[in-house]
Amino acid sequence: APDTAARFASTPTRAGKVALTGLRRGKGAQILAALRHPELAGVEAVLIADTDTRAPDPARYRALLDQVRGQAAFAIADYPRHWDEANLTNHLARPLSAATTGHDVPQPLAGDLALTRRALDTVTRTAAALPPDL
């Protein structure tokens, strides 16, 4: 929606947040742009929340952050879906990521995730090494 950034910015939170606008379309491109944002330089962990969630769940966000504050480098939400949702996830992304990494991630395209500083650095370094057309 056109007012998403304004609504996000006006929502009270206990943690710092940055609304990014004018980014290239696509979740991957937008996450990479967010990870390169200067405000993230000294953070220990980052929570990325899907902005089109109709019922944001603070407990889910806390659980993701708790995982990366513990032993995990990366945590991604695994929430129930209606049987006819997530066709791209169920038929392509999940089997492809499982086949290439050996890890079965139920929601590999979920928009709610948390990363540690080390994971952030690894992702940005790896993305920078890829050909620009990817």
Image (cartoon, rainbow, N blue to C red):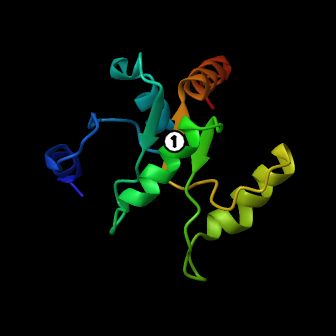
- Seen in the picture, residue 54 relative to 119 is either above or below; the reply is below
User: In the visual, does 25 lie left or right of 90?
Assistant: left
- Seen in the picture, residue 105 relative to 66 is either above or below; the reply is below
Looking at the rendered image, the quarter that the N terminus falls into is bottom left
Pointer 1 local density, CA inside 10 Å: few below 14, some 14–19, many at least 20: many
Residue with the mark numbered 1 = 114
- The residue shown at (41%, 59%) is 59
Residue 117 falls in image quadrant: top right
- The residue shown at (43%, 43%) is 48
Residue 125 position in % (x across, y down) = 62, 18
**Residue nearest the observer in this picture, 56 or 23:** 56
In the image, farthest residue toward the front:
70
Residue 80 falls in image quadrant: bottom right
Residue 85 position in % (x across, y down) = 56, 75
Residue 16 position in % (x across, y down) = 27, 33
- The residue shown at (22%, 48%) is 8
Residue 15 position in % (x across, y down) = 28, 37
- Seen in the picture, residue 2 relative to 125 is either above or below; the reply is below
